[in-house]
Image (tube, rainbow, N blue to C red):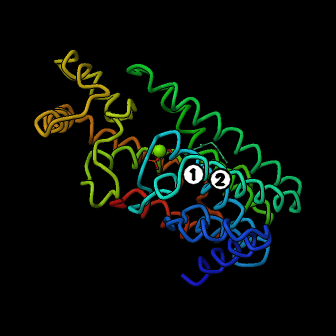
Amino acid sequence: MEELQQVKDQIKQFVIECNDTKSLELLDKLATGKMLRSKLILKIAGINEQSIKLCAIVEMIHAASLLHDDVIDEADTRRGQPSVNALYDNKTSIMFGDILYSKAFTELSQMDKKIAYTVSNAVTLLSIGEMLDVDLTNSFNKSYDKYLDMIYKKTASLIEASAKAAAILVGHDEVKYALYGKNLGLAFQMIDDILDITQDSETLGKPAMLDFVEGKVTIPYLLLHERVEDKEKLESLYKKELSQEESDWIKKQMIQTNALSDSITQAKKLGNEAIEAVKGEENSETLIMIMKAMIEREF
Ligand code: FPP
Ligand code: MG
């Protein structure tokens, strides 16, 4: 998509303005993702100088959070490519993250005050969400409310802010678009958590079924724990390197108890709530398409 190239060019321009060759070299090492947040902003606000800038700011914040997250998670791949912490080291990944989000904030401070508030507030939530996520991996979390609060802050808050800020840019109903973004973000994270179980490592670009090994009790595991007969067995596998037999057992139980299909249903329910929020709005057709493509995605 040509407009996404414009966003990439804007990001590069912002990094060029930092006047630092190492930063430019590092930017080159970042694998491009799906750019969901940019697609959303451009669908709501159209393509113009302000919306492209907003996209670049949000993508830089998102990239910074992933640079930090890969250090925290000790991940050596990102989007199927070696992560910056693996290619260089943890220090470089953290510092480059700092550069990206500071530059993003500098640019954000030049935008409309309400947009600056919306996006920067989301970054506070995102940071709290990451801390909640890490804390939740200390022991087997059995609370759906804690999981939902964590994924709202960690993932949905920035997507919500993107939709809201884009609506502010063009004078649309920001409350409706924020609600759409929030539910899209929640569903997006749930689908991500489901794909961790259903997809193979090649498709994911990282080892499959890694969440549970890392201590993350995502929605399919939460439902499974409620329903499975042998809870002790499930608990004994928590945070353990899983053998083929063990991961097969988990998957089989998830299918038998409908934990997997009900997780998909829950993500779809949130998806429908997102659609409800913007029904009747201008360009709601494309927003529905974004939602559907996101739910039906395979990676
Ligand atoms: C990925 O989660 C992580 C996030 C979406 C947010 C990370 C946020 C921070 C590190 C806060 C710092 C923020 C800034 C702007 C520097 P995941 O580990 O569940 O997903 P993954 O499988 O893609 O790694
Ligand atoms: Mg991670």
**In terms of image quadrants, where is residue 236?**
top left
Residue at position x 66%, y 71% in the image: 24
Residue 11 vertical placement versus 190 (above, below): below
Image spot of residue 93 (x, y percent): 59, 52
Residue 161 vertical placement versus 53 (above, below): above
Query: In the rendered image, is residue 180 in sight?
Result: no
Q: Is residue 119 left or right of residue 32?
A: right
Residue at position x 60%, y 61% in the image: 37
Image spot of residue 149 (x, y percent): 56, 31
Q: Which mark is residue 41?
A: none
> In the rendered image, which residue does mark 2 sit on?
97
Q: In the depicted view, which residue is nearer to us: 80 or 295? A: 80
Residue at position x 51%, y 30% in the image: 134
Residue at position x 79%, y 70% in the image: 19
Query: Which residue appears farthest toward the left when viewing the image?
Result: 245
Callout 1–callout 2 Cβ contact below 8 Å = yes
Quadrant housing the N terminus: bottom right
> In the rendered image, which residue does mark 1 sit on?
67
User: Element under label 1?
Assistant: helix
